[in-house]
């Protein structure tokens, strides 16, 4: 007697949801994706107002491509949002995934029934709200959905979260503070600096910038795939050193201490000197708060 294929429900038609769908179908399971947007691609969907217009990937195509659908071109390439959306569209067409995706359908509640050993999933679509029962549930919606917007005592001006940023035009001629030096913050600060009267970037700790392939980076046309295939051992030691230097918690703490301690000591020394301006003393307090946090 043939076993009835299990029903699998996948929430989200971004990169993770699409590859999960492909793998579930390959195993003979009955899989469906629910996507609240009108198209697939998640934050890379085009057109899409979820991310800023000039977004480029910071991970190259060599690593962003799925192993069963590699990119055709070689060399180092960082796709734009639209180019990566085209790659995902080609992936969907190649594996015939579109017919398994239900668009403009939002999951509002999911509950696992321990007696039935099945998921009860409430969804809303164009026909109203109804319930689905499935054997397995895969949530592929990402982890950064709710913006964390800090409050600043005494500040009455606008505060824009990075997720709401679309372009630099609204910041022309203004003095702008960008909080953070992550990937999005760095992109946004660079764009705004082109049109703003002044752009300041605030970070808890100093930033160390290093190329992923430091030796080959001197050649702007170098081939990343060739490096990984032909010369991994040559560059491994230097890359490992840079990784330890730039991303480990201990390295972050050391760099922060090396940067912060001298500043704190210097500002503490001048705090009570009458000749020092009030602005400098305010800077001392600001730096102490920044380091403490």
Image: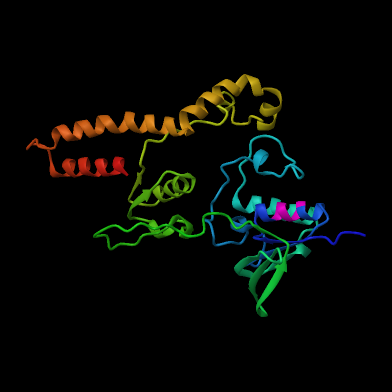
Q: Can residue 40 be seen in this view?
A: yes
The foreground one among 74 and 242 is 242
Q: Is residue 39 above or below residue 53?
A: below
Report the magenta residues as a range: 18-23
In the picture, which quadrant includes the C terminus? top left
Q: How many marks?
A: 0
Residue at image point 66% right, 30% down: 223
Q: Measured from the top left, where is residue 92 in percent x and y?
A: 75, 56
Q: Main secondary structure of the magenta part?
A: helix
Residue 237 located left or right of residue 195 = right
Residue at the extreme left = 274
Horizontal side of 271 relative to 201 (left or right) equals left
The x and y percentages for residue 32 are 74, 63
Nearer-the-camera pick, 282 or 30: 30
Q: Quadrant of the N terminus?
A: bottom right
- Measuring 80% from the left and 53% from the top, which residue is drawn there? 94
Q: Residue at x 69, y 32 (%)?
A: 225
Residue 182: x %, y % from top left = 46, 44
């Amino acid at each position: 007697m043939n076993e009835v294929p299990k029903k699998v429900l996948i929430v989200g038609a971004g990169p993770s949801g699409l590859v999960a769908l492909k793998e579930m179908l390959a195993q003979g399971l009955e899989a469906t994706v629910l996507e609240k947007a009108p198209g697939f691609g998640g934050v890379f969907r085009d057109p899409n107002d979820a991310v800023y217009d000039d977004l480029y990937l910071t991970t190259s195509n060599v690593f962003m491509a799925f192993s069963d659908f590699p990119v055709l071109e070689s060399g180092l390439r960082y796709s734009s949002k639209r180019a990566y959306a085209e790659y995902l569209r080609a992936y969907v067409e190649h594996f015939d995934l579109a017919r398994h995706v239900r668009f403009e359908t939002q999951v509002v509640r999911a509950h696992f029934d321990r007696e039935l050993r099945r998921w009860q999933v409430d969804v809303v679509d164009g026909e109203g709200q109804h319930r689905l029962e499935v054997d397995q549930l895969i949530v592929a919606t990402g982890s950064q959905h709710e913006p964390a917007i800090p409050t600043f005592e005494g500040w009455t001006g606008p505060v824009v979260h990075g997720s709401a940023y679309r372009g630099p035009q609204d910041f022309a001629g203004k003095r702008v503070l960008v909080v953070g030096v992550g990937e999005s913050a760095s992109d946004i600060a660079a764009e705004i600096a082109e049109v703003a009267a002044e752009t300041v970037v605030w970070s808890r700790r100093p930033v160390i910038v290093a190329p992923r392939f430091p030796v080959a980076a001197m050649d702007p046309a170098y081939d990343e795939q060739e490096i990984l295939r032909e010369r991994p051992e040559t560059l491994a030691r230097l890359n490992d050193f840079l990784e330890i230097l730039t991303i480990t918690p201990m390295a972050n703490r050391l760099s922060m201490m090396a940067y912060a301690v001298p500043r704190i000591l210097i500002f503490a020394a001048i705090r009570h000197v009458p000749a020092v301006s009030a602005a400098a003393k305010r800077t001392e307090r600001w730096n102490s708060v920044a380091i403490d946090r």
